[in-house]
Image (tube, rainbow, N blue to C red):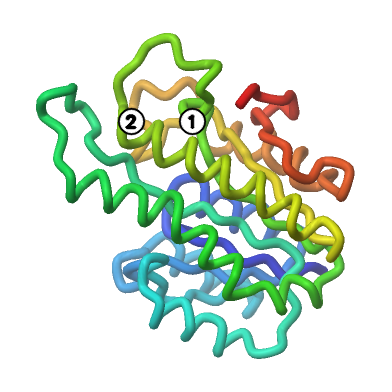
């Protein structure tokens, strides 16, 4: 049994990851911004025989990150999944951009995953897997960008990729594996109804990557099928 921390676990990929890990009797610490509105997650917790607990966490709040760390105490964390994210400026083009929304996107998508990892590092070091996985997007790949647009979202994910790549180098000697995951274009609230795959399909693939990831893969930017995406 492993201990898994998942941010943004109230819906979409985060919720399906929690469900997937529970099927194997893992202990899941499911964090989300508004637990009182997370009906599906609450139902999952009720049926989990205590294997899933729900924790209030706005990943941009230092106070709530500290509360999460205090709650865990010296509990080992085998896998941290930095899943919480937003899509700033969705549907807006150049000339309509809003500075505050862009900064909010950077805070949630780039800064918060690094701060979460920093806050839980001692717990991660105590785990067997010592795995940090951050959900990013192929839209953060500069080499893959042939369509333009989505300035704030692309920039926040490119920055996340860069930061996590550096973290992988810095933590390699401490036995921590740091990877980045592109889940595909998924039918979620963020991805929209036009998404090409379901959350179940995405998570099934992502679990394949997560389950085999080890020191040899640290610093890698994975597509959901396990192939490497160019930076």
Q: Name the residue at 36% across, 73% down.
A: 61
- Helix, strand or loop under label 1: helix
Alpha carbons under labels 2 and 1: distance apart: 18 Å
Say which of 170 and 127 sits in front. Answer: 170
Task: Give residue 25's position: percent from left, percent from top.
Answer: 75, 66
Q: Name the residue at 58% across, 33% down.
A: 182
Q: Is residue 104 left or right of residue 19?
A: left
Q: Name the residue at 17% across, 22% down.
A: 94
Q: Is residue 185 left or right of residue 170?
A: left
Q: Is residue 119 left or right of residue 65?
A: right
Comes first in the chain, label 2 or label 1:
1
- Helix, strand or loop under label 2: loop
Task: Give residue 203's position: percent from left, percent from top.
Answer: 62, 40
Q: Where is mark 2, residue-wise?
A: 192
Q: Where is mark 1, residue-wise?
A: 140
Task: Give residue 108's position: percent from left, percent from top.
Answer: 38, 55
Q: Residues within 10 Å of mark 2 (few under 14, many from 20)?
A: few
Judge depth for marks 2 and 1 and give the one in front. 1
């Amino acid at each position: 049994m492993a201990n898994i921390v998942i941010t943004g676990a109230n819906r979409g990929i985060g919720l399906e990851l929690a469900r997937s890990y529970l099927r194997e009797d893992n202990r899941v610490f499911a964090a989300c911004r508004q637990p009182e509105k997370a009906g599906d997650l609450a139902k999952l917790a009720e049926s989990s025989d205590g294997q899933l607990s729900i924790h209030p966490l706005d990943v941009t709040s230092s106070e709530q990150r500290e509360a999460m760390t205090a709650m865990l105490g010296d509990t080992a964390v085998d896998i941290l999944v930095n899943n919480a994210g937003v899509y700033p400026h969705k549907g807006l083009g150049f000339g309509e951009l809003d500075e505050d929304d862009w900064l909010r996107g950077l805070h949630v998508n780039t800064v918060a995953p690094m701060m979460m990892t920093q806050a839980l590092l001692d717990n991660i070091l105590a785990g067997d897997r010592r795995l940090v996985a951050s959900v990013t997007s192929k839209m953060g790949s500069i080499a893959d960008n042939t369509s333009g647009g989505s300035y704030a979202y692309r920039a926040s994910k490119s920055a996340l990729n860069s930061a996590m790549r550096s973290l992988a180098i810095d933590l390699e000697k401490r036995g921590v594996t740091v990877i980045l995951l592109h889940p595909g274009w998924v039918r979620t609230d963020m991805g929209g109804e036009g998404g090409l795959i379901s959350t179940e399909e995405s998570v099934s693939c992502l679990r394949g990557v997560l389950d085999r990831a080890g020191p040899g893969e640290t610093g890698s930017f994975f597509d959901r099928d396990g192939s490497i995406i160019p930076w």
